[in-house]
Amino acid sequence: MEKTLTIATVLKPQGIRGEIKVKTLTDSAEDLCNFARVFIDGAEYKVLAVRPAGDCAYLTLRGIADRNAAELLRGKEVVALREDAPELPEDTFYLVDVLGCEVVTEKGKSMGTIIDITPAKTDIYVVEGNGKRVTFVAAEGVIEDIDVQAKRVTVNKKRFDEVALYD
């Protein structure tokens, strides 16, 4: 399992005192309140304040004192250590844990391995296997089961074919 989790992306500076607006990659912007420290470009920052706002949040970080310093973080990923993350409820997982999982149909046919996931209202998965690349959305009924321990994602073949884009 990965030791780090990407929890947000810096969108822009907010105001003149170094606050940054971030797009959260967690289930809720309130989840960012659980982190006392974050990393951006390998530098550690103590989280001084978090203001959730919809699917975004405003962060105040120690060492980012003005708009100019905040501007340098635009577009960067906000990363946290897994050990700092709150414990997940049963049957939930971090998307990073799904990367590398084999995708199989309900009949056991391998479709390939998940190489990328784009978080969205309906996550977008990229699978590579058998010399092909397939992109699919995790729409209702497509994914039947995710077993991160066994590194396997089971999909409904009929629904998968309805939403899949083959490269």
Image (cartoon, grey):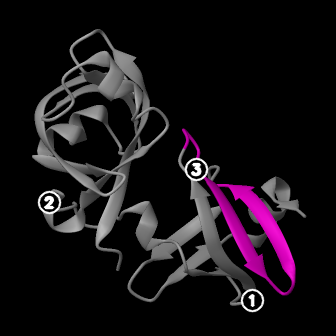
Q: Which element type, helix, strand or loop, lies under badge 3?
A: loop
Q: Is residue 105 above or below residue 157?
A: below
Residue 124 covered by magenta stretch? yes
Is residue 105 visible to the viewer in this orientation of the structure? no
Labels 2 and 1: the sequence-earlier one: 2
Which of the two residues, 102 or 63, is positioned nearer the viewer here?
A: 63
Between marks 2 and 1 in the image, the one whose residue lies nearer the viewer: 2
The amino acid on which the numbered mark 3 sits, given as a three-letter code, is Asp
**The N terminus lies in quadrant:** bottom left
Q: Where, quadrant-wise, is the C terminus in this rendering?
A: bottom right
- Which residue corresponds to mark 1? 109
Question: Which three-letter amino acid code belongs to the residue tagged 2?
Answer: Asp
82 vs 38: above or below? below
Q: Name the residue tied to disc 2.
A: 84
Q: Residue furthest right?
A: 167
How far from the left and from the top, in percent, is residue 96? Answer: 44, 66
Residue picked out by circle 3: 123
- SS class of the residue under badge 2? helix
The kind of residue tagged 1 is Lys
At x 23%, y 66%, the residue is: 82
- Per the rendered image, the range of residues in magenta is 120-137
Q: Residue at x 34, y 21 (%)?
A: 68
Q: Quadrant of residue 24?
A: top left
State whether the magenta stretch is mostly helix, strand or loop.
strand
Q: Secondary structure at mark 1?
A: loop
Cα distance between the residues tagged 3 and 1: 22 Å
Question: Residue at coordinates 77% horizontally, 71% vertically from top-left?
Answer: 157
